[in-house]
Image (spheres, helix red, strand yellow):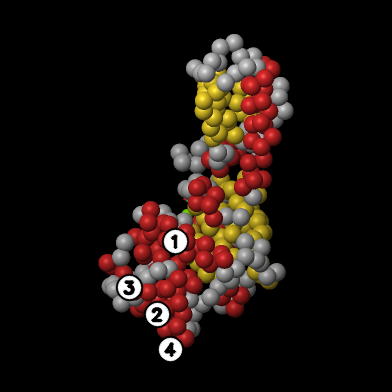
Amino acid sequence: MLEVKSLRKSYGSKVAVDGVSFTVGKGETIGLLGPNGAGKTTTVSMIAGLTRQDSGDVLIDGRRLQGDTDPVKRKIGLVPQDLALYDELSAGDNLQFFAALYDISGSKAKQVIAEALTLVGLADRAKDKVGTFSGGMKRRVNLAAALLHDPDILLLDEPTVGVDPQSRNAIFENLETLKARGKTLVYTTHYMEEAERLCDRLVVIDHGKVIAGDTLRGLYRLLPVTNILEIELDDASGLDLALLRELPNVTSAEISGSVLKAGVRDLSTGAPGILQWLTAQGRTYQHVVSERPSLETVFLSLTGRSLRDV
Ligand SMILES: Nc1ncnc2c1ncn2[C@@H]1O[C@H](COP(=O)(O)OP(=O)(O)O)[C@@H](O)[C@H]1O
Ligand SMILES: [Mg+2]
């Protein structure tokens, strides 16, 4: 559906996007995950044809975008990072304006505007001025605007930044609806929880380069340790950790107070072995927890930096 090939873009001596490539299949949702300044916005604006790349190609259904008036462009809808709404106009009138940009008018415009507002849950606010809306509601109007021409591919540039938790959830539900309708979504974010919830596949970018591209599961496989199993023992004294470390899939073992922390490469195969071994050693325990592997850990192990701290 969408193929991005070696996109490059510099601003003066600053390289914003440095050879980004990825593909997105029909109906797939991919997350473009990276810290602020990674090059996400520049990448989506090149895909949307708003920023001209220095080199590289964007193919839609195998066809290259030919300039600004290419009809193929209508297959794309962009929800930009920066809001582009008139506060003095109502939600409906703002959408009327966007519809006109796509040559949609009259009863057709009325219909698509009503549908889009219903999808984002703002049908009853159509006549209210956007200036009275919360940040989250404005984002949803933005999302509605990108849907008017019924694009197959939706590019979403950090749609939940600065949005209250309730609206954030509403936006997620809207996106899940669109996903269920078979839309192809490209979702940029620096929040890994969002990427984990919504995306089938992730393209991790940093300093304008793709540093990993895979499913969540595949990304976790890049980690030497995917889970830490913590077992609170009744008595941890004299436990032979060297023996424990030799068990299959166990990558590390340490004791802190009465808590045993064991790193496992794969929880399903590693955890039973550890628990059985403890029982065989005559050890009893009261509490077992495992830390979920997270994209944060993946990012840290790929870059040596934390996603949140950059
Ligand atoms: N119009 C511009 N002029 C100069 N530098 C820019 C411009 N747009 C982006 N950049 C720079 O390019 C890099 C990537 O920016 P951007 O694509 O906005 O990243 P992200 O969306 O991942 O935060 C940043 O270092 C940013 O400062
Ligand atoms: Mg950005």
Q: CA distance from mark 4 to mark 1?
A: 28 Å
Residue tagged 1 = 171
Could you say whether the residue bearing mark 3 is in a helix, strand or loop? helix
Residue 92 vs 19, above or below: the answer is below
Could you say whether the residue bearing mark 4 is in a helix, strand or loop? helix
Disc 4 packing (10 Å; few <14; some 14–19; many ≥20): few
Q: Earlier in the sequence, mark 1 or mark 2?
A: 2
Residue tagged 2 = 96
Q: Earlier in the sequence, mark 2 or mark 3?
A: 2
State the residue in front, 27 or 66: 27
Residue at x 50% of width, y 63% of height: 175
Q: CA distance from mark 4 to mark 2?
A: 10 Å
Q: CA distance from mark 1 to mark 2?
A: 21 Å
Residue at x 57% of width, y 39% of height: 293
Residue 106, disc: 4
Residue 125, disc: 3
